[in-house]
Image (cartoon, grey):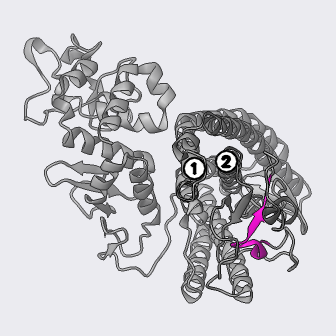
Amino acid sequence: MIEDKIQKAIKPIISIYSQIELDIIERIAEHFKINEEFINSDYWYFEKLKELGGLNNETIKLLEKYTGRTKQELLKAMNDIGINAIPTEQLNIATQKGALLNPEDIINSTNIQNIIKFSYNEIENSFLQLNKAIQEQVRKTYTDIITQTYIKTSSGIYSYQEAILESLDELGNKGISVLEYQTDKGIRNYDVVGTVRRDLLCATRGLAAKVNEEVIKESGNHIVRVSHHFGARIGDGGENYTNHAWWQEKQFFCWNYDGKATEEEKKLPDFMEHCNYGDVQGIVGINCKHFFTVWYGQLKKDELDFTYEENKEQYEKTQQQRYLENGVRKWKRKQVIANKAEDKEGYEKASKKTKEWQERIKTFTKDNNLKRDYTREHVKNTKVVTNKDNNDIIKPSYIRKNTDKDYDTTNEEENIKTAIELMPEKLKNDLNNTEFEIITRNKTNKNYSRYDRTNNKFYIYENSTQEEVIHEIGHYIETKYNILNNKKYIDIRSKGLNNCSIYSVKDLESYSGYKGITNSKFISELQGLIYKKDLQGKSYIGNNQLLNLNCLGEYFSEGFRAYWFESEKLKNTDLDLFNYIKEVLENVK
C-alpha cells in the first residue's frame, strides 16, 4: 500500500527534525538556570539580550549541520514515492484487456520523471523556508521568555524562580511553534515536528496523486478508484467531500482529457465534485490517507470488511491516540527542559508524568488493537522508568539490552533502527542479522559505543545519538569489506599525510587520554585520532620516525558519519573520501 511506503520514506526526515527541535529547546533552556544569580530585573534582561546573538549562531550551525542529510533523504523519499505510486497492476490488467498502451512507456514517461523532479524542488524549497521560520521562532521564543520574566519580576508579584519556571513550562507545553493553521475549531499551532510531518505528508501524497493524474492522461482511461483505510474521517456524514469514509473503494468518472469518455463512464459519480481533489479538505488533502488510481476492474464497489459505524468508532479512537501521543511528547519536552535548567523537582515531576502518559497510551493501544507510532512520541535524551525486563531480547530481535533496571532504551532503539534503515538493502539485511547491545555505565569493561570486530557485535552506550550509531556502522563496513587494506582507500587516506612525523602527534582537547594529528582534510578532531597500535599490533611510530597511518583508526568511520550528517562539509574538506564512501555504498546494493 502506498501509504505504508510514504510513512516509511518520511520517517528518517522526521527523526532528523525531532533531533533538531530538542537540541534547540535544550539550548534555550541552558540560558535559564533556576538557581543562577539574579541581581535585578533590568540587569538580567539586558544580559539575556546579549546572549541572543550566541543562540542565533548556534541555531544556524545546527540547521546547517543537518541540511545535507535532509536533502539526501528528501530526494530518496520523492523518488521512491513517485515510482511506487505508478499503478503497474492496473496497467498490466489494461494490456490483458487489449488496451492500446505500453505500461513500460508510462513508467518511463518523461512527464512523470519531471513531476517527481518538480515535486522534489518544491519540498526542498519548503524546507529552506521552514529552516528560516525555525530561526525566527527561536528568536521569538527566547525574547518572549525574557520579556515575560522581566514583566513578572518587575511587578514584584513573582520571584525570578517562579517567573522563569512558568515561562519554561509554557515552552514545554508548546515546543517551538512554527506554523499556524486555521481549522473549524479555531487556530491550531504546529511545533517543528508537527510541521515537518504535515509538509512531508502533503508533498508525498500530493506527488502520488500527480503521478496518477498523469497516468490517467497517458492511458486514456476515465475511471478512478479510491482506496480505503479503517478509521477514515466521517465529516458531516453526508455523501460529500467532508465524509471520506463514503468514498472508500468507489469508482468515479474523472477527467475526460481526450473527449472519448463513454456514456457508461459518465454515469459514475463525478470525481472532482464528490472528492474535491485539490482542496485541503478533499482527497489527498491535509491528513487524508486516501489515494486514487486509474481503474480497469469491475464497475462496482467492493465490500469492505468493516461497517460504517465501526469505521466511525475507529476514527474516534485514532483521534484519542493522537491526543495521548501529544501528551507524551509534551512531558518529555518538560523533562529535557527541567534537566537543562537544573530544576530537580521539575525533572522528577516530568519523569513521573511521562511514565504515566506512556502507560496510558500503552494500555489504550493494547485495549483497542492500535499500532503505536513512536515517532509521534519520541524525544531524544530522555530517561523514563519502564516495566520491561532489561535482560530480554527486545524487538527487533537483533537488539539486546544490558542496562540498569530503570533505564529506558527507546531513544537508542529508535536510533539503531533509523540508522539501519538508511543503508542499502543488502547492507541493511546484514545489519539486521548482527547483534546490537545497548549498555549503561559499567555494564561492560568500556563505557562508550563501539563495534567489536572479533565478535561482530555492536555496543551502543547510553544516550548515544544516531550519529554515533552511524559512526560504528562505518567500522562494521571497513571490517566487512576489508577497506583498510584497499589500495584506493589507502591512497585517499595518505593524501597530504605521507610525510607526517610522530612529532606532529598532540594531545586531543576533546578526548582525554588520546592523541592525534590535525589536518585541513579532517572533518572533526576525532578523525585525526591516533591509536598506539594498529590492528596488526604495529606501533604508531613507523620507519624514520614517520607516522604509521594504519593507526589513524577513525578516519573512515568518522568520514562515514559525516557522509550522512555533514555531506557538504565532507565534500569541501575531503571530496576523495566522500566519493569513495559513495562508491562503496553503491557497490553493496
Q: Classify mark 2: helix, strand or loop.
A: helix
Q: Residue at x 61, y 37 (%)?
A: 63
Q: Residue at x 47, y 20 (%)?
A: 572
Query: In the rendered structure, does residue 247 fall within the stretch colored magenta?
Result: yes
Quarter residue 248 falls in: bottom right
Provide the residue span drawn in magenta: 244-255
The residue that mark 2 highlights is 207
The spot of residue 326 in percent (x, y) is: 68, 69
Residue 347 is left or right of residue 556, and the answer is right
> Label 2 near label 1: C-beta < 8 Å?
yes
Q: Residues within 10 Å of mark 1 (few under 14, many from 20)?
A: many
Residue 515 visible in the shown view: yes
The spot of residue 451 in percent (x, y) is: 25, 49
Q: Residue at x 65, y 32 (%)?
A: 57
Q: Residue at x 20, y 39 (%)?
A: 481
Q: Classify mark 1: helix, strand or loop.
A: helix
- The CA distance from mark 1 to mark 2 is 7 Å
The residue that mark 1 highlights is 81
Q: Identify which amino acid the numbered label 1 is placed on.
A: Ile
Q: Residues within 10 Å of mark 2 (few under 14, many from 20)?
A: many
Q: Quadrant of the N terminus?
A: bottom right
